[in-house]
Amino acid sequence: MTSDGIDAVDYHCGGEPFRIVTETTEPAGATVAEKRVAAAVDPEVDGLRQLLCSEPRGHADMYGGFVVAPDDPGAHFGVLFWHKDGFSAACGHGTMCLGTWAVQTGLVPTDPSGVTDVVIDVPSGRVTARVATTGSKLTAVDFVSVAGYLLHEDVVVETSRGSTTCVIAFGGAMYAHVAAADFGLSVDKASLPELIGLGRKIKNELNTSAYAEHPLDPRLSGVYGVIFFDDLGDDEGGNVRQRNVTVFADGQVDRSPCGSGTASRVAALHASGRLAADRALIHSSIVGSTWSARIADTTEVAGRNAVMAVVTGRAFSTGHHRFVVDPDDDLVPGFVLR
């Protein structure tokens, strides 16, 4: 952080915040995946994360990213995603915010065709934010995910409300998928305190088991979040309609339908036969925002059937900030009450 402060621009996508910071010390590492590991133990980089996430400058559910150099010239830039508990491997809503920001600021020139690809290196691989424009107006942004695939099904977990089964799928990060109805709950604000507690319990239990091991890259190991969902049936076109809330990190709540979580949901639903390759997942969040997701292609990863999910939403700027630290301030980097 410079003596003049640190500049940031805030966006939201589906209601979930994303704070973009371009001025930070570049962590060591040849790739963004390596930089993520280094950032977690770099006092300056991690200290800035704590400062921007913690109250009074942030809050318990804050999210953001540091823009860094890409792995190679094939991407426009790289990003280190962060939240109040550390650095994450993937972030779909953040990717959509970054693509929108890159086009709006002119960092990536708008393609005259009306579709501009912003290629971004993230810790879990290379993703694309595909920004649609009509004239000067941005009309939508796609999150083109890394390959997603089912890892485990019928995994039994014990909770304070009894046992249930979940599936674990990868969509840039590992997620456990649980029907809220299994606990007599719904994805709504009234159920949220219980869902947060259950999400913490399920995640902690799974992360002490072999189910949390990523089959290809140990840096991607660990169940990042728990997706609680309500199945709302199919629409007239045969598209699957669901509502979800993702509880990730240490009880953090995603206000959006969750980008990488949606990618993992597409993989899980396709593997179960619930989502056909020519149909979409209409995915709503606990605050009512709705994205659509589809399968762009199928592939194979380490002997597993995998899908390339494309998640469509919109992102909007909410403000520009210059954060400062008074040298006499004794509440630095801040605090988190939840």
Image (spheres, rainbow, N blue to C red):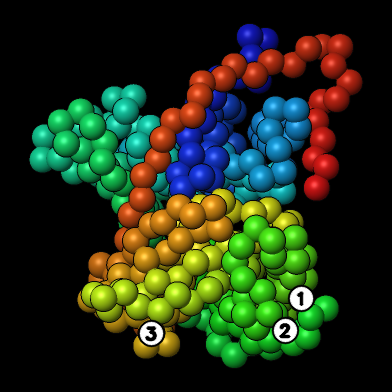
In this rendering, would 163 be left or right of 113?
right
Between 4 and 61, the residue placed more toward the observer is 61
* Percent position of residue 297, x then y: 25, 71
Residue at 38% x, 84% y: name it.
Answer: 274
Q: Is residue 92 above or below residue 200?
A: above
Sequence-first tag of 1 and 2: 2
Q: Residues within 10 Å of mark 3 (few under 14, many from 20)?
A: some
Label 1 SS = helix
Kindly identify the amino acid type of the residue bearing the numbered disc 2: Val
> Which sits earlier in the primary sequence, circle 2 or circle 3?
2
State left or right for residue 287 relative to residue 117.
right
For the point 59% across and 66% down, which residue is it?
A: 187
Quarter of the image holding residue 334? top right
The correct choice, above or below, for 315 with respect to 148 in the image is above
List the residue tagged with mark 3. Answer: 274
Residue 149 visible in rendering: no
Q: Residue furthest top?
A: 4
Residue 285 x/y as whole percent: 51, 58
Quarter location, residue 204: bottom right
Mark 1 highlights which residue?
205
**Label 1–label 2 contact, CB within 8 A:** yes
Give the SS element for disc 2. strand
State the separation of the CA atoms marked 1 and 2: 7 Å
Please give the label number shown on residue 157.
2
- What's the residue type where badge 1 is placed? Glu
Nearer to us of marks 3 and 1 is 3
Q: What's the residue at 75%, 66% (across, down)?
A: 194
Of 118 and 256, nearer the camera is 256
The percent coordinates of residue 225 (x first, y second) are 62, 64
Q: Give amino acid for label 3.
A: Arg
Looking at the image, residue 56 sits to the left or right of residue 230; the answer is right
* Circle nearer the N terminus (3, 1): 1
